[in-house]
Image (tube, rainbow, N blue to C red):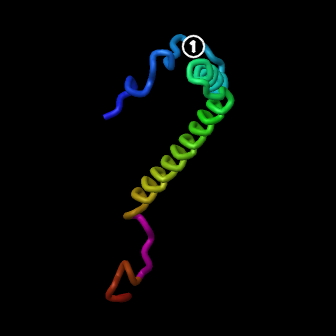
Amino acid sequence: MITLSDILLPEDILLDLEVGSAAALFDEVGQNMQRWHGLPRVQVAAALAALVRRRTLAEMAEAAGRMRRVRHAALGDSTLRSDTQACPEGPK
């Protein structure tokens, strides 16, 4: 199993960082990655923002799916039946 310590170098860890938004955080991470690893700051920040957008959309879709399943389960036994389904032998 891979742990965070296998992936991150000490210089990749930013502590006590104050930012006002996610964009500012991604820019700080981008600056750090550029300083220590030569990666383009703008591309790192854009990639992080895109990752968060994809994850957020995926989480929203998953939540919508859960709500549909819950609603379906709640309505499952209370669906209306036609008279022939309620009384299969026909009207009396």
Q: Does residue 63 appear left or right of residue 52 in this picture?
A: left
**Of residues 41 and 22, the one drawn nearer to the viewer in this rendering:** 41
Query: Where is residue 17 shown, x and y percent of the image?
Result: 57, 13
x and y percent of residue 2 in the render? Answer: 35, 32
Mark 1 neighbour class, 10 Å CA radius: few under 14, some 14 to 19, many 20 or more: few
Q: Check disc 1 and report the residue beneath it.
A: 17
User: Magenta stretch?
Assistant: 78-83
Q: What residue is drawn where x is 65% and y is 34%? A: 46
Q: Is residue 15 above or below residue 74?
A: above
Magenta span: chief secondary structure: loop
Q: Is residue 27 magenta?
A: no
Work out which quarter of the rendered image holds the C terminus and state it.
Answer: bottom left
**What residue is shown at x 32% (from left), y 88% (from top)?**
89
Residue 84 in picture, x, y percent from top left: 40, 84
Image spot of residue 1 (x, y percent): 31, 34
Q: Is residue 82 magenta?
A: yes
**Outermost right residue:** 42
- Is residue 88 rendered to the left or right of residue 21? left
Report which quarter residue 31 is drawn in: top right
